[in-house]
Image: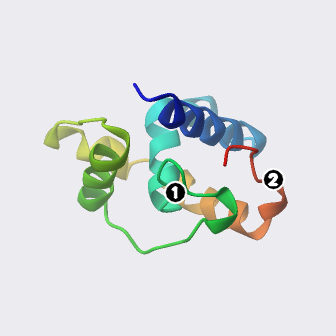
Amino acid sequence: MNDKRDEYIEAAQQVIVSLGLPRAQKNERSALSLLALLNLMPGKAWADAENPLIGITPMMDWVRKHYGKEYAPNTRETFRRRPCIRSATLVWLSTIRMIPTVR
């Protein structure tokens, strides 16, 4: 995988850890969900994070397009069951001072 992609995934996982989310949320899928919810593709500055309205299937498409991770359609439910990430995104956007150094 691309080094920049890996850096962003790792940084997103650190944000999840910093927010104190449950252990079940501290995985690559949750990190990719967070990146999708922030519309943060590799190379985009964390300071330019957004909060677009995005559904589950478009989120999975976004992850495939920008991070090269393909998830089977039957995993849609797994993405949907992670509502903590949506709430965490709002918390993260309100405390943008935690911006990782990945640029």
| Horizontal and vertical percent position of residue 23 | 62, 29
| Horizontal and vertical percent position of residue 22 | 64, 36
Residue 40: assigned label? 1
Q: Tag 1: Cα neighbours inside 10 Å, few (<14), some, or many (≥20)?
A: many
Give the label, 1 or 2, closer to the camera.
1
Q: Tag 2: Cα neighbours inside 10 Å, few (<14), some, or many (≥20)?
A: some
Left or right of residue 100: residue 90: left
Tally the numbered discs: 2
Q: Amino acid at mark 1?
A: Leu
Residue furthest to the right: 97
Q: Amino acid at mark 2?
A: Met
| Horizontal and vertical percent position of residue 42 | 49, 47
Q: Nearer the viewer, residue 5 or 23?
A: 5
Residue 98: assigned label? 2
Which image quadrant is residue 56 in?
bottom left
Determine the secondary structure under disc 1.
loop
Left or right of residue 87: residue 56: left
Task: Please name the residue shown 49% across and 55% down the image.
Answer: 83
Left or right of residue 65: residue 40: right
Task: Please name the residue shown 48% across and 36% down the image.
Answer: 5
Q: Is residue 39 above or below residue 27?
A: below
